[in-house]
Image: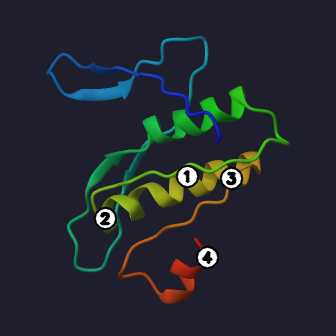
Amino acid sequence: LYPIGLEYIPVEFDADGKPTAPCVQSARGGSGGLATAKLPGAKPKLMNAKPYLQLLKRIDETYPRNERGDLLIFLSGLNEIMALAEPMREYAKETKRWIILMLHSTLPTEEQDKVF
């Protein structure tokens, strides 16, 4: 069995009480920005990709390149998946350490098969 680590990253709130990117309680940080879902006929939904990108960076800083693993991120729907896919793919291209795969019942079977 592989050990599972859990680390709490609290959410910060702005002056209006709206959540902002999480405050990482260590010297490690991250970068990122806002992403919008681009589905035909769907309302664009603004989603902050920064917490997810911080998580990828944190993992990269914690584990050596030769150590392999997986990260599953569960989101509430296809809009959210699509909104995070592009910023995460950009990060993966930059670091050459991640393969970003999406899984949703409405995606083509060929795309879904890549996950398995």
Please give the residue where the numbered disc 4 appears in the rendered image.
114
Residue at 29% across / 64% down in the picture?
77
Residue at horizontal 39%, vertical 25%? 22
Camera-side mark, 2 or 4: 4
Q: Earlier in the sequence, mark 3 or mark 2?
A: 2
Question: Closest to the observer: 103 or 57?
Answer: 103
Quarter occupied by residue 11: top left
Tell whether 100 sits left or right of 7. Answer: right
Check disc 3 and give the amino acid type: Trp
Provide the residue designation for mark 2.
79
Residue for badge 1: 88
Q: From the viewer's perspective, tell me whether residue 87 is left or right of residue 18.
A: right
Alpha-carbon distance for marks 1 and 2? 15 Å
Question: Where residue 101 appears, x then y in whole percent?
Answer: 56, 65
Figure check: 14 above or below 46: above
Label 3, label 2: how far apart the Cα atoms are: 21 Å
Q: Which residue corresponds to the image point at 70% horizontal and 27% vertical from the top-left?
A: 62
Position of residue 17 measured from the top left corner of the image (x, y, whole percent): 15, 22
Q: Residue furthest bottom?
A: 109
- Which image quadrant is residue 2 in? top right
Nearer the observer: mark 3 or 2; the answer is 3
Work out whether residue 46 or residue 9 is closer to the camera in this orientation and state it. Answer: 9
Mark 1 or mark 3: name the one nearer the start of the chain.
1
Q: Secondary structure at mark 2?
A: helix
Measure the alpha-carbon separation of dots 2 and 4: 20 Å
